[in-house]
Amino acid sequence: MSIADAPAPRPVGTSDPTTSTGSTSATTPSPAQVSPVSWIYLAVCAILVSLNLRTLYSSLSAILTEVTAATGLSGGAVTVLTTVPVTLLGLFAPLAPVLARRIGAWQVLFTAMLLLTAGLLIRALPPFGSVPLATLLTGTVISGLAIALSNVVLPSIVKQDFRNHIGLMSGLYTTCVAGSAAFGAALTFPALESSGSWNIALGLWALPALAVAGLLVPVVLRHRSRAHLATSTTGPSPLTSAIAWQITLMMVFQSMMSFPIFAWLAPILRDRGMDGTAAGLVVALNVLLQMPGSLLAPILAARLRSQSVLNASMALLTGVGWVLCIIGPLDGVWVWASLLGLGQGSLTALALTMISLRSHSTHMALRVSGMMQGLGYGLGSSGTLLVGQILTASGNVTPVAVLFSATAVGAVVFGWLAGRPRLIQE
C-alpha cells in the first residue's frame, strides 16, 4: 500500500468519513451547504448532460456511408474521424481539474455544454472548398474537448453534491451515457431520411446540448459564491497513490474492451457469416443491455464494503462475452452479446464509481478522475487500433480472442485491487 493510501474506516459509498489519517483540514461540505438549488434539479441536470456525451460518436457512424458519398472523404479521413474522438477523451481530460479549480465544477459543465453545442454545429456545416474534412474535424475536436471535460467533472460532482446517493447517481449518469450512444445510432438515420440532408441530421444533436446549457444557468448562478470550495485544498498527487493507479489501470483495461464493440463487433460477426442487418442488431442488443448493468452495478457497489468480487466478476463476464462472440458457436451469439453487454456496462460504471468510493474529498475525486480518464481513455483507445492491426495482419479472429482474454485478466486483477476498502489518503 502506498504511503498516500489508508484503509477505509467503514463501508464507503454512502457518505464521507469525517476524519482520515493524514487528510487535509478541508472536508466535503454537507449537501445542504453545497446544494442551494434542489438536489433533484441538480440530478436532472447531471442526467441530461450525460444524455449528450456519446451522440458525437454514434450519430456520424449511423450515416457514415452517406456522409462519405456526399463529401468524397478518403479512407484515411474516415479513419481520422472515427478514431480521433476517443483519443481526445484522454488528451483533454487533464484540463478539467485545472479549470474546475479556477471556476468550479458546475461552471466547467456549463462551459462544456456550450462547447458541445458549437462543436456539433460546426461539424454539420457544409464542407469548405476542396477540404471536406476541415469542418468535420474542427467540430469533432471541439466536441471532444467538451465531452472530455464533462467526463472528468461528473464523478466529482457526484461526490460533491450527491454524497448520500453515490451509487444511485453513478448508476443513473453512466446509464444515460450508454443511452446517448443508442439514441445517436437509432435516430440519426431517420433524421437524414426525413430532412434529406446529412448536415441537418448531424446538426440536430446540438439542440439538446444547448437546452441543457440553458438548464444549467441557474445552477451556475447559485454556485458562483463557492466556485472554488471543492477544489481549493492542496495535498499529495494521486500519482503517488497505489489505489489511484489501480483505479486507472482498471479503467485502461475496461476501455480496451469497451470501444472495440462499436468499431469491430459487427465486422467480426459479418466475417463469421452473419448478414449486415443481423450483425447490426446484435450490436444494438449489446448496447441496450449495457444500460441495466450501468444502472444497477454502482448501486450495489455503494452498499458493499469491498467491491473486489463485483469488479472482478464483471471484468471476467466481459472477457468471456467477447471471446464467445469471436470464436464461440454462432448460434449462441445473441446470448454471448448479451453477456458482453451486461458485463461491459457494469464494468464501465464500476470503474467510474471507484473514483467516488476511493476518494475522501471532492478535491481528490476530481484529481483522480482527471488522471484515470486521461490515461484510461488515452491508453484504452489502443484496443480498437490493436484489433484492426491484428485483423489486417492475420485475417484471423483467433488472435483477437487471445487479446481480449489477456485484457480481461488485467481488468480482473486491477478491478480486484481497486475494489478493496481503502481511501486515497490526503
Image: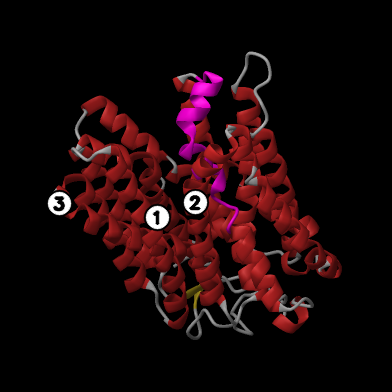
> Callout 2, which amino acid?
Ala
- Measuring from the top left, give residue 217's x and y in whole percent: 81, 62
Disc 1 + disc 2, Cβ < 8 Å: yes
Q: Is residue 59 magenta?
A: yes
Residue plotted at (67% across, 48% down): 95
What residue range appears in magenta?
51-73
Residue under label 1: 287
Q: Which quadrant does the N terminus fall into? A: bottom left
Does dot 3 land on a helix, a strand or a loop?
helix
**Picture quadrant of residue 311:** bottom left
Q: Amino acid at mark 1?
A: Val
- What secondary structure is the stretch in magenta mostly built from? helix
**Residue at the outermost top position:** 130
Give the Cα separation between the discs numbered 3 and 1.
20 Å
Q: For numbered disc 1, what is the local secondary structure?
A: helix
Mark sitting earlier along the chain (3/1): 1
Q: Residues within 10 Å of mark 2 (few under 14, many from 20)?
A: many
The residue under the point 53% across, 76% down is 168
x and y percentages locating residue 322 in the rendered image: 26, 51
Q: How many marks?
A: 3
Q: Is residue 263 left or right of residue 108?
A: left
Figure check: 206 above or below 285: above
Q: Is residue 362 visible?
A: no
Residue that numbered label 2 is attached to: 181
| Residue of label 3 | 331
The mark that comes first in sequence, 3 or 2, is 2
Is 71 magenta? The answer is yes
Number of other residues with Cα within 10 Å of mark 3, as a class: few under 14, some 14 to 19, many 20 or more? few
| Circle 3: residue type | Asp
Percent x, y for residue 32? Answer: 74, 83
